[in-house]
Amino acid sequence: MENEVQQKKKIFTRYEVFVIAVLAFLQFTIILDFMVLSPLGAQLMLELDITTAQFGWVVSGYAFSAGVAGLLTAGFADKFDRKKLLLFFYTGFIGGTLLCALAPDYDSLLIARIVTGLFGGVIGSISFAIITDLFRMEVRGRVMGFVQMAFATSQVMGIPIGLFLANRLGWHSPFFMIVGLSALVGIAIAIYFRPIDSHLKVQSDRSAFQHLVKIISHPFYTRAFAATTLLATGGFMLMPFGSAFSVHNLGISLGDLPMLYMITGICSMITGPMVGKLTDTLGKYSVFFAGSLLSMLIVVIYCNLGITPLWMVILLNVIMFVGISSRIISSSALMTAVPEPMDRGAFMSVNSSVQQISGGFASVIAGMIVVQTESGVLLHYDTLGYVVLGAMIITVVMMYFINEQVSRKATVMAGAK
């Protein structure tokens, strides 16, 4: 035990551990703000009297505005201290989430989601740029593993609590909870984060527009953005209607939904850091390939299910999320090696923008494919599964070539030293 502790101390300093913890908690609030809509889907469609297509727009409204914000800020992303940039957008995200909490109807909720996306969609890219600035490539898998634990934690703590509050106090209450948690994170960043401005020393005198043009026209970067487009398809297509599918198609009661999300999240929390470590030891692409195969298998099975026992639904969800988290952690770590130091902020902003916009289109398309009958049953959910399967197969091939170029780039840099 003592040897393990000493080894961890060698890998990360106390300040680095603090940064990882804060970024993980920050990601928790961002992801929870998005993910809480999925389990609230059944309740929102009923209380606001909206269709699946309208609910798809609520989800994609955040994604589209986040994508636009990413493109607009990309040219400026490397021109400022990343701490100040993070605080600015995080403050806007808190304000947008507050508007969601106060929204009285569908139209105001849609507008609130758009405002939240304008700020929240940029935060992930800033966080990844900070990770790339502060941590060497050899440990980024571990860092991503811990930061991506936020995804699982939102299921273990956030979503069950959010569902509990929604059932007791109404669907607005989870957003009030997110506002309170986010305010605490913002204070911690403002007080304890050191300036993150080393990238300013290698900046050119290009204008923001010229910097953006360079990023989106770079051949290697363009291939990475194309892979990101397909990476976003899976989550954005399946997640928005996940709760409705579980309730109306699989026969899971609303009361059992918190248990489903909690057990799945606990398993994801345990496996997240393990996947991160494997990503560093076995290789980013190897873990991505394995996670993709597992995800493809489970997606096809899951999307074709009918009435299913709760224990089997939980088991399939656990396996599916292990596969998905393996894809997210490994691909995120690999993508940090793509941009040059002077392009990190802009690359991450455009990459996040591409992810959000493509995810937004995926949500809209999913809302058009899926049809809810009068009894609540969702039709054509299996079609979504096959679309996701096709996207995953193509992405595996694209990520292979990206990994090959990253490896060649690392070899050249090592030879130059």
Image (cartoon, rainbow, N blue to C red):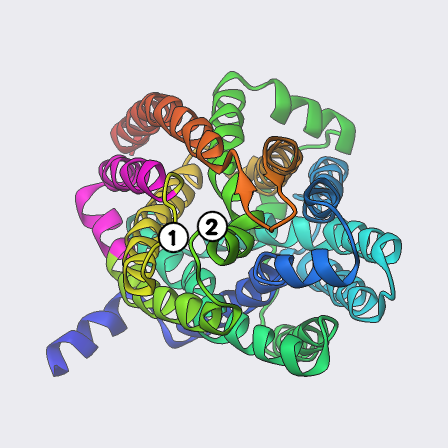
Question: What residue do we see at 26% from left, 54% from top?
Answer: 275
205 left or right of 264 in image: right
Asked if the magenta segment contains residue 280, the reply would be: yes
Count the marks: 2
Based on the picture, tell me whether residue 141 belongs to the magenta stretch. Answer: no
Tell me the residue that label 1 is attached to. Answer: 307
Identify which residue is drawn at 52% across, 16% down.
219
The numbered mark, 2 or 1, whose residue comes first in the sequence reads: 2
**Residue 402: x %, y % from top left:** 37, 25
Q: Are marks 2 and 1 in contact (CB under 8 Å)?
A: yes
Quarter of the view holding residue 395: top left
**Which sits in the foreground, 263 or 185?**
263
Please state the horizontal and vertical placement of residue 73, each as a whole percent of the image: 74, 41
- Give above or below for 415 relative to 95: above
Q: Report whether 406 appears left or right of 1.
A: right
Q: Is residue 382 above or below residue 32?
A: above
Residue under pointer 2: 249
Give the extent of the magenta segment. 275-302
Instruction: Give the amino acid at mark 2.
Output: Asn
Name the residue at 37% across, 47% down: 324
Magenta stretch, main secondary structure, is: helix
